[in-house]
Image: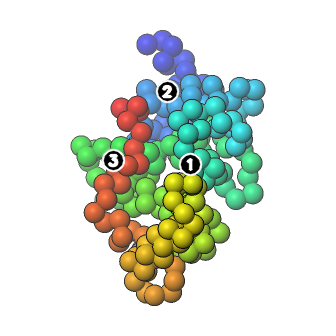
Amino acid sequence: MGSTSSTLLKIPNVEELVQETGFSPAHIIRLYDRFKVLDKEGRGHLCPKDFGAIKELAMNPIRDRIISAFFSPGKETVDFYTFVKIMAHFRPVDKDRPKDPNSPEPINSRSNKLKFAFQLYDQDKDGKISRDELLKVLRDMLGMQVTEEQLESIADRTIQEADLDRDDAISFEEFRKSLEKVNIDHKMSIRFLR
């Protein structure tokens, strides 16, 4: 118990992190320990290359997009506080947690998980997923498993089905609507945090 308390004392704004993210103090400590392992040089921040040490991420075909989601435009480092807030997107939804109508929407809500996923596609941050952006993700994910012609067909069909306003791109609202029946909590949750 003593080591848990002393670790929590080392973490700045821990109460705020618990409140904002819904992580328990034990989860925050686990994330802190993981952050320290990734921060091999003890700088107090991570840069994109530090994420290369995550073996699960190394095998992900869209790892570069996932890693870039941790960094604000123009920033090359991420501190622990920001790291935890981004990891909160992957926290399973706590169905037993009482909903306070005066509180902001939880970071790990369905809507926020979808916004996070949307930004992995919308690389130019214009609020739309273009055919080219979709094709880049499909190439990353499917690579040599399918032909370029098949990739283009998948992209065209996806845009045709999701693009309700017929502007040849997918807005966030169209993205959200196209994924209504998908269990995003299951697909975007890291269970080791339970």
**Side of 190 relative to 146 (left or right):** left
Q: Position of residue 114 (x, y in %)?
A: 43, 60
Q: Position of residue 70 (x, y in %)?
A: 61, 49
| Amino acid type shown at disc 3 | His
Reading the image, the residue beneath label 1 is: 61
- Residue shown at 43%/87% (left/top)? 165
**Side of 53 relative to 100 (left or right):** right
- Residue shown at 41%/33% (left/top)? 193
**Mark 3 or mark 2, which has the lower sequence index?**
2
Q: Are marks 2 and 1 in contact (CB under 8 Å)?
A: no
- Residue shown at 28%/63% (left/top)? 181
- Mark 3–mark 2 distance (CA, rounded to whole Å): 21 Å
- Mark 3–mark 1 distance (CA, rounded to whole Å): 19 Å
Q: Position of residue 128 (x, y in %)?
A: 54, 74
Front of the two marks 2 and 1: 1
**In the picture, residue 149 is in which quadrant?**
bottom right
Q: Position of residue 35 (x, y in %)?
A: 60, 31
Reading the image, the residue beneath label 2 is: 30
**75 shown above or below 21:** below
| Amino acid type shown at disc 1 | Pro
**Which quadrant is the C terminus positioned in?**
top left
| Amino acid type shown at disc 2 | Arg
Question: In front: 69, or 140?
Answer: 140
Front of the two marks 3 and 1: 1
Q: Are marks 3 and 1 in contact (CB under 8 Å)?
A: no
Reading the image, the residue beneath label 3 is: 186
Question: In front: 11, or 35?
Answer: 35
Pick out the residue farthest to the top: 2
Front of the two marks 3 and 2: 3
Q: For label 2, count other residues whose C-alpha is less than 10 Å away and answer few (under 14), some (14-19) or many (20+).
A: some
